[in-house]
Every structure is written in C-alpha cells, then in structure tokens.
Amino acid sequence: MSKDERHVVFQDRLRSAGLKVTAPRVAVLGILSDREHLDAETIFSAVFVLLPRISLQTVYGVLAALVSAGLVRKIEPAGSAALYECRVGDNHHHMVCLTCKRVENVDCVIGASPCLTPSNFNGFIISAAEVNFWGLCSECQLVAAL
Amino acid sequence: MSKDERHVVFQDRLRSAGLKVTAPRVAVLGILSDREHLDAETIFSAVFVLLPRISLQTVYGVLAALVSAGLVRKIEPAGSAALYECRVGDNHHHMVCLTCKRVENVDCVIGASPCLTPSNFNGFIISAAEVNFWGLCSECQLVAAL
DNA sequence: TGAGTTGTTTTGAGTAACTAAAAACAACTG
DNA sequence: CAGTTGTTTTTAGTTACTCAAAACAACTCA
C-alpha cells in the first residue's frame, strides 16, 4: 500500500469516527500502524520528523481523541508511561518484561474473554477486562544468566 | 485480638521477612490489615495520627520495603495512584470502578490461575498474571441513572 | 467558493505521584 | 552497650501528564 493510500485509510477512519481530519492525527495513526506499544514521547519524536511544528501536548491531545473515538487503545502497565496501539476491537492481552519493560501481545489460550467471568460481582457492571502477564523476555533472561 | 497482640504478629512478620522492626513499619502493617486498597497518601494520614513525626517519604520507603519482602501487595490501576493491600499469596484479582476508582477484590470463577496460560509465550518466563475488571460500581450506577 | 462555526493545535503554565541523595538516627549483633 | 548496618528524615528533583487561553484550521452551508 502506498503512503497516499494509507493516508486515505486513516482519513476515512477519522471521518467515520466523527473526528476532523488533521495532519497530526493522520501522522499518529500512521506511526501506530507501523509499530506497536509506543509511548507519547516516542510518538511525538516520530511525528516531529514529519511535522516539525507539532508539540508534545498536541500528541497527548490527539491520542486522547483517538482513544475516546475507539481508534486507538491505551494501555497503562504499572511502572511505565502509557502505551498506545492501534490493534483495537479484539480481546488480546499483554506480556510485560519486568526488566526492560518491553510489551508483547498475547492471545488468551482459553478462548473468548475467559476472564470476563468473575465469581463475585458485588453489584458491579463489568465493561472490560484487562489481563497482564509479568515476566522476563528472552533477551533479559540471557542478560540475567551472565 | 488486642492491639498489643496485633503488634506482636506484625513484628514477627517483619522479622521473618528479614526486616528490622520499626514503629512506622508496624503502623503501616496495622493500617493495611484494617482496610484494603489504600494509597500512600491515605496510609500516611493514618500513620500520622499514631506517629506525628513521620513523613510521606518514609511511608513510600516502608511500603517499598514491605512489597519487596512480600508482606504487602502493590496494585497500580491505570489512572490512579498505586494502592497497597496486605492480602498476599493468593490469586485474587481486582474490579475497578471507572467513575469513582473504588477497588474491590474478585476471585476468578475459573479456579486457580486460569489466566496464567497464554497461548504464545514468545520466550517469556511468566512470573505473575494480573487481571483487572473495569466497570461501574453499584453506587455509581445509581448516580448515572439520575 | 468563502464566511462562519466548531473543533484542533499551540503555547505556556501547573500538578500529582513518586524517586533520589545525604545526613541524622535507631535496631539488632556480639 | 559499643558498633555496624539498615531506616528515617529532610530537602530536592523528576516524570508523565493535565489545564487553560489564544491562535488557527477543518468542515458546513449559503
């Protein structure tokens, strides 16, 4: 897909979510579809190359708009800055390395939303479940073995 | 159990974890065994009543020591300050109200550590799984219905 | 097409929740 | 009870955002 075709896709996504199409939004969507699990600072650096007049605050604003429109998912692993990914609408979980904080996707082996079934709701209406695994990624295992 | 008996229990716990017994530590353990899911600021206020010379930084230090000794569990719900609880060693999860941020415990209906079984490990060594449910608590449902 | 409206971005400032470092102090050891 | 080692206090500093107001740009409709 050419750069222009990608842009059209992002523009359509923005429009059907009821958002105005702006250069920062298209750029952020582009970066998030290239790489997963990026924090605001990293996204800012990447957008800055394309749009040198952009500010970090704008990136925060764009991300908030995209998240609340459902185009982007925000994950907030304990102890790190929030991360954003544009894989949205499925039920995947995350695996976080305790050492390097790297995040990878996981699909739950049990199938569809197993953990959406707690035993005691206490009157809660559950709207989402979040599953995070913590451990050592293969690289940090090697380092730890030294 | 009397106040003194409780203190002895906490002192023993500290000692068997290899930690020195100090007034701030005993006080923090006491508060955490009375109430669940407290943040550092709340714990500080409660300890301050007993030990007016204590500082917030000490509370952070005490909590860090207790967590790394395994006597206290730290939970970090997205969008709130970290919370601490002394129910430790079991596999319970948490339910967080999207509106008031209240946290309650849940036991997973599937049984023991269901979610410790992701399908694709990618070489990770998993050491913990964390499950959080997000929704509306019964009180905030009433408010929302108005 | 272009004026108006509404929503975005920019700029600048401010905050919450920690984290770090050094000096004063207290708990356990023998 | 003196010494050592680990804690606490005090003071600063940082990270990751959040807020507000003014400048600006996207879409709408004549």
Image (cartoon, coloured by chain):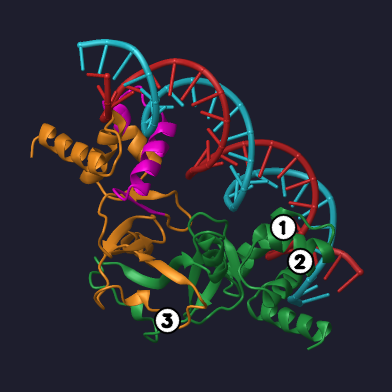
Chain colours: A orange, B green, C cyan, D red
Check disc 1 and give the amino acid type: Thr
Say whether mark 2 and mark 1 are on the same chain.
Answer: yes
Spatial CA distance of label 3 from label 1 is 35 Å
Task: Find out whether the residues at labels 1 and 2 contact each other: C-beta distance under 8 Å.
Answer: yes
Residue at figure coordinates x 52%, y 81% from the top left: B89
User: What range is drawn magenta here?
Assistant: A47-75
Q: Chain of mark 2?
A: B
Q: As displayed, is residue B144 above or below residue B87?
A: above
From where the camera sits, is residue A13 visible? yes
Residue at figure coordinates x 28%, y 48% from the top left: A71
Give the labeled residue for mark 2: B24
The answer to which of marks 2 and 3 sits earlier in the sequence is 2
Q: As displayed, is residue A138 above or below residue C27?
A: above
Give the labeled residue for mark 1: B58
Q: From the viewer's perspective, is A75 left or right of D19?
A: left
**Within the image, what quadrant is residue B43 found in?**
bottom right
- Badge 2 element: helix
